[in-house]
Image: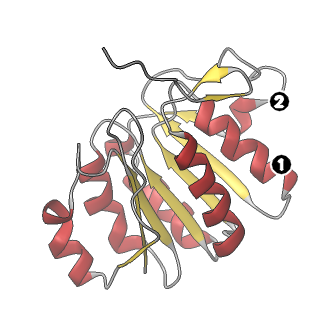
Amino acid sequence: MRHFIHTTFLGKEVRQSEEGFRLWEKVLSLIKPVQIIELGTCPGTLSLYFLLYTMENADISFHTFDNQDCSQGYLKNKINFNSYFKQLDIRESVEMIKGLIQNKKRTLLFCDDGDKLWEFITFAPFLKVNDIIGAHDWNVEISHDDIKDVISKENLKPIFDEINDSSKTFIKLFQK
């Protein structure tokens, strides 16, 4: 039987891999986004990572959205997480999220909610030149074949390599 060591961040389990955190450190330091928008918050440990990153880099804003209430628990009350988290139906909030994407200069949009394919296809057309879009669970819930038309139409270029972790999930990032 194979045993996996789960990744933690500040002592709490995360659904990202250790390699995923190294990727985020690399991505964030290289692309220097002006804002990070995360679609899909719960359980919120990656959201806390993004939030702490933006708190350390005050010129970066952070927004995270989920249809579940992900506002309570681990550290969230201590750092005013509700200022960054909004509980809403992403499908019913396309115009609001579009406005956020188009409001700032360089956006990193991370699709990690319940329908990554829909999120990617829906929001990729709103990206500006140099914006980044990414999806978690690459080749599990979303693949190149699923989005090849939007990749071509929006002139998206893959950046970095997808990161494999022990639970067979991946992250894939594209730049417009």
Q: Which residue is at the front of the view, 42 or 123?
A: 42
Q: What residue type is labelled 1?
A: Met
Spatial CA distance of label 2 from label 1 is 10 Å
For disc 2, the marked residue is: 79
Q: Which residue is at the front of the view, 118 or 26?
A: 26
Quadrant of the drawing holding the N terminus: top left
Callout 1 crowding tier (Cα within 10 Å): few <14, some 14–19, many ≥20: some
What colour scheme does the image use?
A: secondary structure
Q: How many marks?
A: 2
Q: Is residue 144 left or right of residue 14?
A: left
Q: Position of residue 46 (x, y in %)?
A: 59, 37
Quadrant of the drawing holding the C terminus: bottom left
Does 39 sit above or below residue 155? above
Q: Is mark 1 on a helix, strand or loop?
A: helix
Q: Is mark 2 on a helix, strand or loop?
A: loop
Q: Where is residue 175 in the image (x, y as percent from the top left)?
A: 45, 77
Q: Is residue 13 left or right of residue 29?
A: left
Callout 2 crowding tier (Cα within 10 Å): few <14, some 14–19, many ≥20: few
Q: Residue 84 carries which label?
A: none
Does 123 sit above or below residue 82? below
Question: Would you identify the image quadrant in which residue 26 lies?
Answer: bottom right
Does 105 sit above or below residue 108? below
Q: Which of marks 2 and 1 is nearer the N terminus?
A: 1
Q: Position of residue 172 (x, y in %)?
A: 39, 60
Question: Would you identify the image quadrant in which residue 12 lies?
Answer: top right
Q: What residue type is labelled 2?
A: Ile
Q: Which residue is at the front of the view, 72 or 5?
A: 5
Tag 2–tag 1 contact (CB < 8 Å): yes
Residue at coordinates 82% horizontally, 29% vertically from top-left?
Answer: 79
Residue at coordinates 37% horizontally, 48% vertically from top-left?
Answer: 170
Q: Residue 55 carries which label?
A: 1
Question: Would you identify the image quadrant in which residue 78 lies?
Answer: top right
